[in-house]
Image (tube, rainbow, N blue to C red):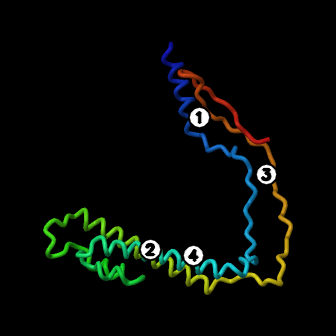
Amino acid sequence: MRTPRVLLALCLVCASALSVRPTLADEPERPTRVDTGVYPPSGTQLNLALVGLGATAVWYGAALGFSYAWPDAPGAEDLRIPVAGPWMALGETGCADDDPGCSTFTVVLRAILTTMDAVGQTGGVLVAAEAIFLPTQDVAAAPKRRPLPRLEREQGLMLRPVPYTAGRDGLGLGLVGRF
């Protein structure tokens, strides 16, 4: 007598669990609108160029420090060349011929640091180059403000059964919906 009830309850729980779709009870978010006609102010080009050149200088300083930290490593002299040096040093990654204590860890560490320097220096140059092509807004032009369109809410009634746990041993079936 107890087995059919347990089997029926198990079937109902499985059926309700398999038919559940994710709930849509999130808070509504205002859609983001980007006005493509607005450009950064005219002084942005100089600031962007300075940031790019500053980043290149910082990464070049790191590469220069690595070249003096491991002066006998293959490619150490190449690291002293700005921007192209780390890329050239990557081709010579390995142990020096006269270094019997060279380990795989040191080689991998130098390769990772050299790659970071190469990407950092190149990225800084590319950011500085972007400043040349960056469109800016005209000082005389005032931005036109357009009103945001009204948000429309979905209309209609929606109810959905959702299983839930009640305490340690309890199961239940509830309703969620949109009114």
Q: Earlier in the sequence, mark 1 or mark 4?
A: 1
Give how far apart the Cα atoms at labels 1 and 4 are: 57 Å
Q: Which residue is more in the foreground, 43 or 171?
A: 43
Local SS, label 4: helix
Give how far apart the Cα atoms at labels 4 and 3 are: 46 Å
Residue 157 position by quadrant: top right
Type of the residue with mark 3: Glu
Give how far apart the Cα atoms at labels 3 and 1 are: 26 Å
Tell me which residue sits at (73%, 39%) in the image. 177
Type of the residue with mark 1: Ser
Relative vertical location of residue 78 with respect to residue 154 in this rendering, above or below: below
Q: Residues within 10 Å of mark 4 (few under 14, many from 20)?
A: some
Tell me which residue sits at (36%, 69%) in the image. 113
Q: Residues within 10 Å of mark 3 (few under 14, many from 20)?
A: few
Give how far apart the Cα atoms at labels 3 and 2 are: 53 Å
Q: Pointer 3: what residue? A: 154
Give how far apart the Cα atoms at labels 2 and 4 are: 12 Å
Question: Which residue reaches farthest top?
Answer: 1
Q: Which mark is residue 59?
A: 2
Local SS, label 2: helix
Q: Pointer 4: what residue? A: 51
Q: Which mark is residue 16?
A: 1
Nearer mark to the viewer, of 3 and 1:
3
Nearer mark to the viewer, of 1 and 4:
4
Local SS, label 1: helix
